[in-house]
Image (tube, rainbow, N blue to C red):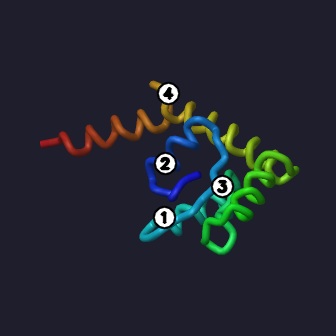
Amino acid sequence: MTHCGSNSVSESVAYGVPLICRPFFGDQHMTGRMVEEVWGVGVKVEGGILTKSGLLKTLELILGHEKGKEMRDKAQALKHTVQVAASPNGTAAKDFSHLVELISVP
């Protein structure tokens, strides 16, 4: 369960955990939409209001249905992508090194 803050989503992606999203304000709504509609690794709380029945329905979807299995599989695949990018020779490390070079030039 996440409010879709950047750190919460990053941590869930890094561990391959599907998300139940309940965004509150600002960029959280856009992040929740990315999680559900673009990456397919989570689902937003129905109607945007957290209720016992809505939470149970969402948990059942993620843990029991075929769509939930697809989300779990996509979350694991995204986890692998992030791990490769964040490795010492990955694209994230290379991009960061390049940025340091750019801003260090006198």
Q: Of callouts 1 and 4, which one flags the residue occurring earlier in the amino acid sequence?
A: 1
Q: Which residue is mark 1?
A: 28
Mark 3 vs mark 1: in front: 1
Badge 4: how crowded within 10 Å, few (<14), some, or many (20+)?
few
Q: Which residue is mark 4?
A: 87
Q: Which residue is mark 2?
A: 8
Q: Of callouts 4 and 3, which one flags the residue occurring earlier in the amino acid sequence?
A: 3
The secondary element bearing badge 1 is classed as: helix
Find the distance from the CA under tag 2 to the CA under tag 1: 10 Å
Find the distance from the CA under tag 4 to the CA under tag 3: 21 Å
Q: Of callouts 3 and 1, which one flags the residue occurring earlier in the amino acid sequence?
A: 1
Mark 3 vs mark 2: in front: 2
Mark 2 vs mark 4: in front: 2
Mark 1 vs mark 4: in front: 1
Asked whether disc 2 touches disc 1, contact meaning CB atoms under 8 Å apart, the reply is no
Residue lying furthest front:
52
Residue lying furthest bottom:
47
Q: Nearer the viewer, residue 40 or 85?
A: 40
Task: Specify whether 98 is left or right of 78.
Answer: left
Badge 1: how crowded within 10 Å, few (<14), some, or many (20+)?
some
- Give the residue drawn at x 53%, y 62%: 31
Badge 2: how crowded within 10 Å, few (<14), some, or many (20+)?
some
Residue 64 spot, x, y in % from top left: 84, 47
- Give the residue drawn at x 54%, y 53%: 2
Q: Of callouts 2 and 1, which one flags the residue occurring earlier in the amino acid sequence?
A: 2
At label 4, the amino acid type is: Ser
Find the distance from the CA under tag 1 to the CA under tag 4: 28 Å
